[in-house]
Image (cartoon, helix red, strand yellow):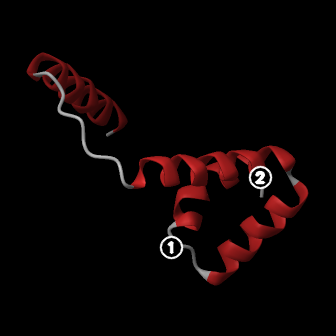
Amino acid sequence: MNCQAATRELSNYIDNELDASLRAELEEHLHGCTHCTVVLSQIKHTVEVFCDAEPVALPPDTRQRLYEALQKKLNSTL
């Protein structure tokens, strides 16, 4: 497993949503890769910091621009 593949799976790893073989492959990569281990640590820390945070309301115009950007991105990947 390379760093790009590992990075794509980190969220699933944290959420315990990987099958046993992929989990083992990712853990093997993490044992030998300082970069991915740091990224994993930062993701875990970010989740801990924001876990209990209250949602922040977006101004209506910001919400609309964000929605439009997400729709455009979604449509470009289809």
Question: In terms of sequence position, does the residue under pointer 2 or pointer 1 come before the other?
Answer: 1
Circle 2 — which element? helix
Which SS class for mark 1? loop
Residue denoted by label 2: 37
Disc 2 to disc 1, C-alpha distance: 18 Å
Residue 10 at what x, y percent from top left?
A: 60, 57
Q: What residue is drawn where x is 24% and y is 35%?
A: 56
Q: Nearer the viewer, residue 14 or 69?
A: 14
Q: Which mark is residue 17?
A: 1
Q: Nearer the viewer, residue 54 or 58?
A: 54
Is residue 5 toward the left or the right of residue 52 in the image?
Answer: right
Say if 39 sits above or below 10 in the image: above
Query: Tag 2: Cα neighbours inside 10 Å, few (<14), some, or many (≥20)?
Result: some
* Residue at the far left in the pictured view: 60
Quarter in which the N terminus is drawn = bottom right
Quadrant of the rendered image containing residue 26: bottom right
Residue 21, picture quadrant: bottom right
Residue 16 located left or right of residue 38: left
* Tally of numbered discs: 2
- Kind of residue sitting beneath label 2: Thr
Please name whichever residue, 13 or 42, is drawn nearer the observer in this view of the structure: 42
Q: Which of labels 2 and 1 is toward the front? A: 2
Q: Are marks 2 and 1 in contact (CB under 8 Å)?
A: no
Q: Residue at x 9, y 22 (%)?
A: 60
In the figure, is residue 69 to the left or right of 25? Answer: left
Query: Tag 1: residue type?
Result: Glu
Please provide percent x and percent y for residue 66. 23, 25
At a point 34% along the width and 47% down the height, the residue shown is 53
Structural crowding at the residue carrying mark 1, measured as other residues with C-alpha within 10 Å and reported as few (<14), some (14–19) or many (≥20):
few
Which mark is on residue 8?
Answer: none
